[in-house]
Image: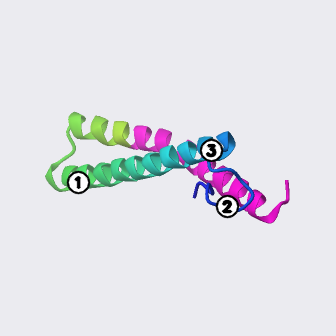
Amino acid sequence: MSGANRPGRPANDPVLMQRAKVADLVSKGLRLGTALYVVASVVFFIGFMTGFTNTVKVLVIVLLVIGSALLAPALVFKYGVKAANRADRDGTW
């Protein structure tokens, strides 16, 4: 995803290096945010079957809020990195 191997672009191009860092953070944010959603779903269904205590309610809400806080910017930056890579590839800057 970094594009450091493209012909005509030096391997140590700071823009490509920064884009690769952002892509790595995006990947981690997507994985962690999705994992938090899965955990929130599991906790919700456990609470549904055993009875919702205040702890279960708070835990589900906190997991969903943190997961959303991670997923929203990760998705935006994911599309930004894709668009920048496409613009580099097509020369449409």
Does 13 appear in magenta? Answer: no
Estimate how packed mark 1 is, as few (under 14), some (14 to 19) or many (20 or more) residues with alpha carbons within 10 Å: few
Q: Which of the marked residues, 3 or 1, is nearer the chain's N terminus?
A: 3
Looking at the picture, tell me which residue is in the foreground, 2 or 38. 2
Residue pictured at 85% horizontal, 59% vertical:
92
* Residue type of the residue flagged with mark 1: Phe
* Residue type of the residue flagged with mark 2: Arg
Kindly report which numbered mark, 3 or 1, lies closer to the viewer in this rendering. 3
| Residue extent of the magenta highlight | 64-93
- Give SS at disc 1: helix
Looking at the picture, tell me which residue is in the foreground, 18 or 40. 18
Label 1: which residue?
Answer: 48
Query: What secondary structure do most residues of the magenta stretch adopt?
Result: helix
- Give SS at disc 2: loop
Q: Position of residue 76 (x, y in %)?
A: 62, 48
- Distance of label 3 from label 1 (alpha carbons): 53 Å
Q: Is 76 displayed left or right of 49 in the figure?
A: right
Label 3: which residue?
Answer: 12
